[in-house]
Image: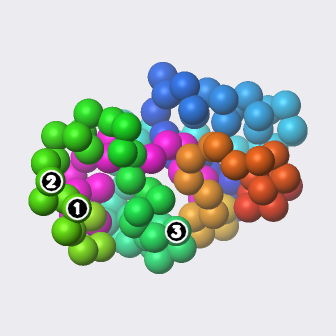
């Protein structure tokens, strides 16, 4: 199975990741989370691999609109929130062979290579 990259096309971090993948000859399938939002089961599997905290897009409007009660949320509440609004998910999110391996794109080059297995 190819690498899947979840995100939105106009996201600057996603664009940076696409360029890096292309420059490094890594084949990937892009899934636009606005058009194809992930379901609860996918989100739960991603959270098992990555944890809910790294998956939160804390710089987005959707996150800020949640209010302070989000600070006390358990993982199940985050699953619900992510399922209702994919904009709460940090982008891009990389899935390899059905398992979430990386979220965001700020790590050093060698860390990204290791996590993506390239």
Residue position marked by numbered label 1 in the rendering: 71
In the image, taking residue 1 as reference, residue 61 lies left or right, namely left
Residue 54, percent across and down? 47, 59
Q: Nearer the viewer, residue 57 or 98?
A: 57
Query: Which circle's residue, 3 or 1, is located before the other in the chain?
Result: 3
Callouts 3 and 2 close, C-beta under 8 Å = no
Q: How is the image coloured?
A: rainbow
Q: Position of residue 66 (x, y in %)?
A: 16, 48
Disc 1 crowd, CA 10 A, few/some/many (<14, 14-19, 20+): few
Rendered-image quadrant of the N terminus: bottom right
Q: Is residue 84 magenta?
A: yes
Query: In the picture shown, does residue 68 fall above or below 80?
Result: above
Q: Is residue 23 left or right of residue 94?
A: right
Number of residue marks: 3
Residue contact between numbered discs 2 and 1, judged by CB atoms under 8 Å: yes
Identify the element where label 1 is drawn.
helix
Instruction: Bin the neighbour count of mark 3 within 10 Å (Cα to Cα): few under 14, some 14-19, many 20 and up.
Output: some
- The image shows residue 49 at horizontal and vertical percentages of 54, 73
Residue drawn at x 39%, y 46% is 57
Residue 36 shown in magenta: no
Residues drawn in magenta: 79-95
Q: Give the residue at mark 2.
A: 68
Q: Which one is closest to the eye, mark 3 or mark 1?
A: 1
Sequence-wise first label, 3 or 2: 3
Q: Residue at x 62, y 57 (%)?
A: 102
Q: Position of residue 52 (x, y in %)?
A: 39, 66
User: Circle 3 is placed at which residue position?
Assistant: 50
In-image side of 100 versus 64 (left or right): right
């Amino acid at each position: 199975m190819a690498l899947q990259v979840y995100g939105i096309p106009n996201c600057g971090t996603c664009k940076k990741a696409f360029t890096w993948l292309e420059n490094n000859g890594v084949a990937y399938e892009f899934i636009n989370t606005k058009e194809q939002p992930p379901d609860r089961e996918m989100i739960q599997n991603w959270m098992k691999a990555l944890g809910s905290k790294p998956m939160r897009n804390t710089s987005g409007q959707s996150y800020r609109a949640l209010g302070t009660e989000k600070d006390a949320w358990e993982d199940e509440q985050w699953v619900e929130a992510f399922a209702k609004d994919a904009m709460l998910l940090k982008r891009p999110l990389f899935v390899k062979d059905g398992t979430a391996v990386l979220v965001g794109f700020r790590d050093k080059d060698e860390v990204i290579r290791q996590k993506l297995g390239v």
